[in-house]
Amino acid sequence: MSLSLIAQSIGESATLKLNEIASILRAKGDPVIHLGGGEPKGKAPMDAILAASAMLNSGEVRYTPPDGTPALKKAIIRYTDEFYGWRPAPENVMASGGAKQAIMSALHAIINPQEEVIYPAPYWVSYPEMVKLVGGVPVPVHPEDGGFIPRIQDIEQVTGSYTRAVIINSPNNPSGAVYPAEFIADVVDFCERRSLWLIMDDIYHRLIFDGREPVNCYQFTKDRSNNSKLIIINGVSKQYAMTGFRIGWAVGNTKVIEAMTNIQGHETSGPSALLQHAAVGAINGIQSIVKNMRLTLENNRNILMEQLRSFDGVIIDEPGGTFYSFPDFSHYNKDSVALSKFLLEKVQVVTVPGIEFGMEGHLRISYCGSIKDITEGIERMKWALDPNSPNELYIGERKLVRDWT
């Protein structure tokens, strides 16, 4: 079978594949613990459910404009005004079938074949593949100090004549790192001076801990005209625990939003009317759900950090946000794929190999599940990896005996 060059160059999503594996194991009745997940376990806001129910009961669920319903765009405008201090016009806003689709539409609109897109490592698994899908060249940036926080010098060193755009994701998936305001200011200034597009993937921007406030990238802009190359991406999936609703959005200059809308109109048409209605309910509804989720996740993070510190060989950078951690397990195995498979096979704990995010030796461990899953999952991992652990482990009524060193 002959497939396109782009199709041949794209790999499957590691995180989605692991979700599938975990679902299959659970369906078989296996006591799998999924510490690789990327969705909060809380329920969607009641305001979202009621809004969707009202529309469903009306029976009037029709096509929507390709850039989103007026009601959702109005809610996004209010949201942007509240969190970014900028009140965009409706033509500056496009709703989409998730933040991922908004990023894809943006890349389609701004990237020509062989142009480069820069993003710091560790990075979300989809960035390289998304850039390839539009014919671009992905350019990961590894901080010189080997950590999770980039400097503007790291960005500058890989910027060349083919560089077209920079993607920044803070708080970061997979590390949970929150980039300092100074770095965000530097990258905004750098992109404006070099006339580069800057895509701010802010999907986790309200899920930050330790009393911090979200960094507002827009406060650092000098160019607020219709020539601005700043695109802000967000959505309801993470902060409102509405991953399955698949509603995101982009805010940018009118030219790029028009181009993105035209592209989206041909690819998928407008997002679901029902789910946009639910998103309006969430954005305009009671916001305590976000605060409560943040407090729950912060507590889960603290428990996970305490558990991980019981390992002798694990190096940990405490996450400042999201619901991910990215500890270094290279003391046990530098091959993160082999290590992840080992943990799944021996103790049925799902983790995501660090190499998928651009850093070998690490595992992405999520703490968005229950405290029971976190503590039992880490207990199983420690038993599998630490030769000083007891030789036996019970998973339910099943006794495991460690027959490896």
Image (spheres, rainbow, N blue to C red):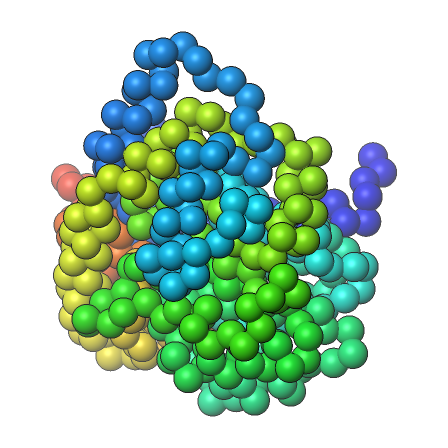
> Where, quadrant-wise, is the C terminus in this rendering?
bottom left
Q: Quadrant of residue 50?
A: top left
Residue 90, horizontal then vertical, whole percent: 52, 45
Q: Nearer the viewer, residue 174 or 205?
A: 205
Tell me what residue is drawn at x 55 percent, y 68 percent. 224
Image-based side of 314 in relation to 86, left or right: left
**To which quarter of the image does residue 1 belong?**
top right
What x and y, as percent, mark residue 204?
37, 58
| Image spot of residue 381 (x, y percent) | 27, 60
Residue 101 visible to the viewer: yes
Q: Nearer the viewer, residue 340 or 188?
A: 188
In this picture, is 326 found above or below 202?
Answer: below
Query: Percent from the top left, x then y, of residue 64?
Result: 54, 26
Residue under the image location 71 percent in, 69 percent down: 164
- Kindly identify the residue that appears in the image at 77 percent across and 73 percent down: 162
Of all residues, the one furthest to the right in this rendering is 2
- Above or below residue 326? Residue 255 is above
**Placement of 150 over or under 46, stated as above or below:** below
Residue drawn at (81%, 59%), measured in percent from left and top?
113
Q: How many marks?
A: 0
Is residue 32 in view? no
